[in-house]
Amino acid sequence: MSRTVLTPRAEDFPRWYQDLITKAELADNGPVRGTMVIRPWGYGIWERMQAGMDSRIKAAGAANAYFPLFIPQSYLQREAEHVEGFSPELAVVTHAGGKDLEEPIVVRPTSETMVGEYLSKWINSHRDLPLLLNQWANVVRWELRPRLFLRTSEFLWQEGHTAHADEQDAAAYARRILHEVYADFMRTELAIPVVPGRKTRHERFAGAVNTMTLEAMMGDGKALQMGTSHEFGQNFARAFDITYTDAEQHSRLAWTTSWGSSTRMLGGLIMAHGDDAGLRLPPSLAPIQVVVSVVRDDDEGRPVSVARGLVEELITGGIRAELDDRVDIPFGRRAVDHELKGIPVRLEIGPRDLAEDRVTLVRRISSGKQPHPIDGVLPAITTALAEDQHLLYSEAETRREERTADVTGLDEAREAARTGWARIPWRSVGDRGEAELGESGITVRCLVLPDGAVPDTDDPAVEPDLIAVVGRSY
Amino acid sequence: MSRTVLTPRAEDFPRWYQDLITKAELADNGPVRGTMVIRPWGYGIWERMQAGMDSRIKAAGAANAYFPLFIPQSYLQREAEHVEGFSPELAVVTHAGGKDLEEPIVVRPTSETMVGEYLSKWINSHRDLPLLLNQWANVVRWELRPRLFLRTSEFLWQEGHTAHADEQDAAAYARRILHEVYADFMRTELAIPVVPGRKTRHERFAGAVNTMTLEAMMGDGKALQMGTSHEFGQNFARAFDITYTDAEQHSRLAWTTSWGSSTRMLGGLIMAHGDDAGLRLPPSLAPIQVVVSVVRDDDEGRPVSVARGLVEELITGGIRAELDDRVDIPFGRRAVDHELKGIPVRLEIGPRDLAEDRVTLVRRISSGKQPHPIDGVLPAITTALAEDQHLLYSEAETRREERTADVTGLDEAREAARTGWARIPWRSVGDRGEAELGESGITVRCLVLPDGAVPDTDDPAVEPDLIAVVGRSY
Ligand SMILES: [Zn+2]
Ligand SMILES: [Zn+2]
């Protein structure tokens, strides 16, 4: 039934993705090229992502703040690699308040420069360090080939910015964010088995001395970068004069980091878990976990009143439940819509079910459909939601494992990248191999140690052991 | 002691305001004229404001969404009064992605036009109505005389946008937001006795047929507009072709509303409750409700360990508590800082207190300072926080009442506006009186009915009964 609603993934994955976003009412294109409108269903998922990330960020000791959207063009120019990296993507305000501006203003593509200026003002003594900030904001990077959630000219994100007294503390914090905030959130709540690793020198963020990433495999075997954590060494501290007085009254340069994750995670969620019937939402992020859907009502209105009672019971039990009593819309059409939107559990209820004091429990993720006595439906649902959260994760993990090949040469890597990823010794790739793979549209997603740990920055001792994870990507 | 920290209010209220914002570390000026950096303490308060507003907005049935920052210039021009109202304040992007743009892009000053375009796409049938949306976003209105939180070139806000099948439903919803969301939040959580009322024709939002407002009296007797709720009639529906098919298959124009509140509320909070020692935060919005402050430690570290235990106990009891064990910073300086920041309760603990198994409980709002046995400190604090939340409200209410004069003529109104507000029959003012008062910098803040109710739009029947609340304003 639902197969007719979306283009099947096997036929055209990018079109399936676009269809799903439209039909599940997640987002629309904005009028200005590359911008996007996030519709309530998409935004409701984003709100739950924000909540899950925000509590972890706060647990890691960072406080939220807000820095201006508008950056003087001169700020960008203070860090040479940074301005070079962002210049082609900038949107520039030249006119404001009815006048042409003397100095053009850049709409922030990211806030390292702006935050750098204030870290410099706020930090005086070693007592002020570490200074751990985060902001939730919109940023603008002009996109020539936009795609909803994945590459948009404006997107929503969080960007963390921290300053530390020494290199070790900065390095430890950038890794703490990578593991305790990003990897934990993505695995536990997004149900995506991300691979943390280090980016090659070539793939580093503009101005960083080390960029760490979390890579996820999508349903078509391609990779998506889900978040990044950067060490800047003293580059920004030097450019913005972020200095502090240490315990012996010596003036020293600070060490800074930044780290970000965005609405791009919504794209990752869709492509990691969606199927030909639509989205499949991890129960922990679903704005509605259970829809109680009345098949049809009877003369006394009993199905609707029982359904309403069930919704109350579920809400009291801590479940996000909603009633669908739109019996004037064909039941099949509503079911297709609930599947498209990825609501984890559907409770169907009609006169025939009621005659037997039962409901039909339909699970979106494990695809089961079973009658269940009305009594005791709450514990059954609680169990189903927990099981299906894990099931989504293990399905994604199985795919990632099955579609990742351990190889030794570039040809094999190219072959593996047709359907997934390759793991190949970095010493067999190197800068030259990386460029060669690039010609086939394949990139080194990250470097990891044989045991899966994230290698330290440019440590020559571990260089011979590094494994490169390579593949095509979004 | 703390009197030396800030310029006293009686001496120079605007300077006191600016001093307080800087010294309480609430915000800083941004590098681009009129922009602002919201520091963690200010942002923490804003986050709690957002939470309080957001839950009320959702309870009123609106769902959050996100619309683009960038609006094609042509959109603004579709509603004549709207573009006229906003043109002088616009920031315009003329260059992006390394090229000059064919059509200039406006950075949103508000989103009626953008949302109008999508309401038109999303609304087909009467079943789609009412459509109730809200977004949390940044907006830009170029300010020539910026003041932190009150008038900034960029500010953070929520803007609600709704479409309805008929005028009555739109009118009722705009009033529901005014009362159940805004007035309730501002009274209950901000502890500010706002006056809801209708704006005069002259003070209406650009494009609205009715603007309702919530006016608050600040510590210096001036008024601050804390939020607004607008009815647009069918103006935007006509400009953006927002039509629906009714039950009889006739095509009809929808009726729309919008409503907004912003970081300006932070300015209102400061000016309504602050005193010469700093900010006084309503306990329900304070990021830290209780600071447990160690006066000095002893050799065994007992004060710090007891203080830490108290913090745990308070947190378990549902109170936002934090430890201040920075005993190397003079205790007096820390106390001044806690007062500046407006933390409602301070628990002071030192070796001498411990010898008597007590702490010193200092209340920021009611200014009490009393010893209290360590046992049973949690219920004492819970009571203090609830009492002081109410005390803040009633202090502000008393001031508003004492400084509001019932008058009959413009001269008396001008006199009253030197220290507060005047209530004057609208029939004694009218368009001409409004212009005359304007010459003295006095505006009609709102129109109310004698019983305090908000009058209906331009209802000639109630016109003779209307009371104008007039005063100076921010
Ligand atoms: Zn030193
Ligand atoms: Zn009709």
Image (cartoon, coloured by chain):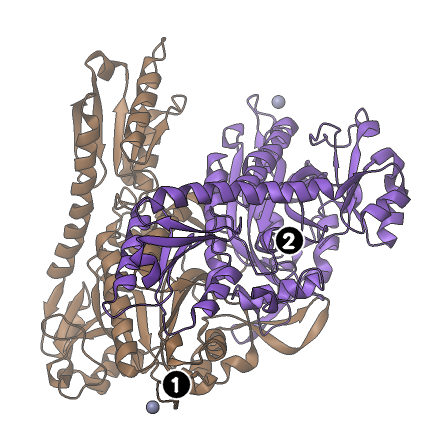
Chain colours: A brown, B purple
Report whether A387 appears left or right of B109. Answer: left
Label number found at residue B357: none
Residue under label 1, please give it. Answer: A235
Q: At 35% from the left edge and 41% from the top edge, which residue is drawn?
A: A287
Spot occupied by residue A313 in the image (x, y as percentages of width and height): 29, 26
Label number found at residue B75: 2
Q: Taking B96 as reference, is B401 above or below it?
A: above
Q: Taking B319 as reference, is A374 above or below it?
A: above
Question: Mark 2 or 1, which is nearer the eye?
Answer: 1
Report whether B423 appears left or right of A275. Answer: right
Three-letter amino acid code of the residue under disc 2: Tyr
Q: In the picture, residue A279 is in which quadrant?
A: top left
Query: What is the secondary structure assignment of the residue under circle 1?
Result: helix
Quote the CA–CA distance across marks 2 and 1: 43 Å
Query: What is the secondary structure assignment of the residue under circle 2?
Result: helix
**In front of the other: A361 or B446:** B446
Report whether A230 appears left or right of B444. Answer: left
Of the four image quadrants, the one with ligand 1 is bottom left
Three-letter amino acid code of the residue under disc 1: Asn
Spot occupied by residue A160 in the image (x, y as percentages of width and height): 38, 68
